[in-house]
Amino acid sequence: MLPTGEIDMRRRKKLYQLVFSLIILALSCWALLWFLRPGTQPRTQIFQGIFLTVEETPSGRLMIVEVHWDTPGVQFSNRAYSFPVDPTNQDSPHYRTTFADWALFREGAAVLVNTTLFLPDSLKTFLPGYPVRSNETLVVDGEVSHVHDHSYLLYWDADGNVHLQRSKPPSPESLDAAVSGIGLQGIPVSQGQVRPRAISDHGEANARTFIGVDPERKVLFLMAFEKATPIQMLEQAVAHGVKVGGQVDGGSSTNLIIGTGAKDLPPHTGIRGWRPVGPYLIVKAESL
């Protein structure tokens, strides 16, 4: 039997080895994510019908993905529900949290972006696999998650036309017509103009995700900001061609990442938060 002092020494050695290994793992992950941070580039086609722009702003990088949804081969959809959906049950979960990069790989997507806020707001939701509920209304392949009283529904009908209901909550008519839909927190960009009263916390710079459209050109804009105030976000959205749109979940949930097959980009290039995501939107497209 080993002396007590020698046992304690071995335990301390193993603890030191574990701590050292965790530090090396954390540094390796940080280095990898830094390598996958997108470099600045002008508007460039990276898939058929998908263009990427990356700019340096005073607060950090801005990443803009344009999805021309009438391009042959381009498809987009909300994440499929993880649980059976009951719109009348206001407590039932919709998804299990997952890391965005794993979801990108699993879905075989060209682009993945986080969408609506999700609940509960708990430390448990920072663990992958935890059941969560979308705060705003979602429509996934025609199936409605629930009716949220404060959602402005951005949706596409069966003919591929986009609509934004400018009143809340989503009407039965809009929900019946929607094939795919995302509930926005507000409509701070309308008719290509900034509407600052439609958003709060004007002075707070944070990571942000913005989704907008140009209905006439049939372009979906997915935008991720490493850091921006709401006004900076809206001004950039308008400057890059958004006609109508709004903010979705942000902060540590901000994720906009590019999948395998993009021209001149390593897989998983993007702006990402460190929190697992619940709801997200996937885009599929053909390589160039």
Image (cartoon, rainbow, N blue to C red):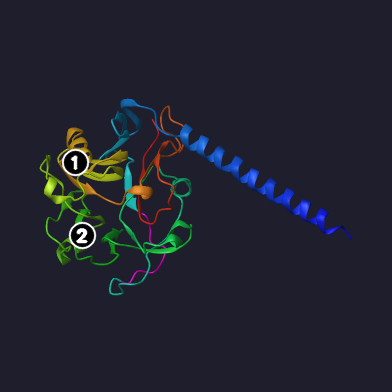
Question: Residue drawn at (41%, 29%), measured in percent from left and top?
Answer: 263
Q: Is residue 94 depicted above or below 213 in this figure? A: below
Crowding around mark 1 (Cα neighbors within 10 Å: few <14, some 14 to 19, many 20+) is many
Residue lying farthest to the bottom in this orientation: 88
Of marks 1 and 2, the one in the foreground: 1
- According to the picture, the residue beneath numbered tag 2 turns out to be 151
Name the image quarter holding the C terminus.
Answer: top left
Amino acid marked by disc 2: Ser
Per the rendering, the mark at residue 231 is: 1
Crowding around mark 2 (Cα neighbors within 10 Å: few <14, some 14 to 19, many 20+) is many
Q: Is residue 246 depicted above or below 271 in this figure? A: below
In the picture, residue 259 is in which quadrant? top left
Residue range of the region highlighted in magenta in the rendering: 79-86
Q: Secondary structure at mark 2?
A: loop
Image position, residue 218 (x, y; %): 20, 41
Amino acid marked by disc 1: Ile
Image position, residue 72 (x, y; %): 30, 39
**237, 16: nearer the viewer:** 16
For the residues labelled 1 and 2, the Cα–Cα distance comes to 21 Å
Image position, residue 79 (x, y; %): 37, 55
User: Number of labelled discs?
Assistant: 2
Q: Secondary structure at mark 1?
A: helix
**271, 218: nearer the viewer:** 271
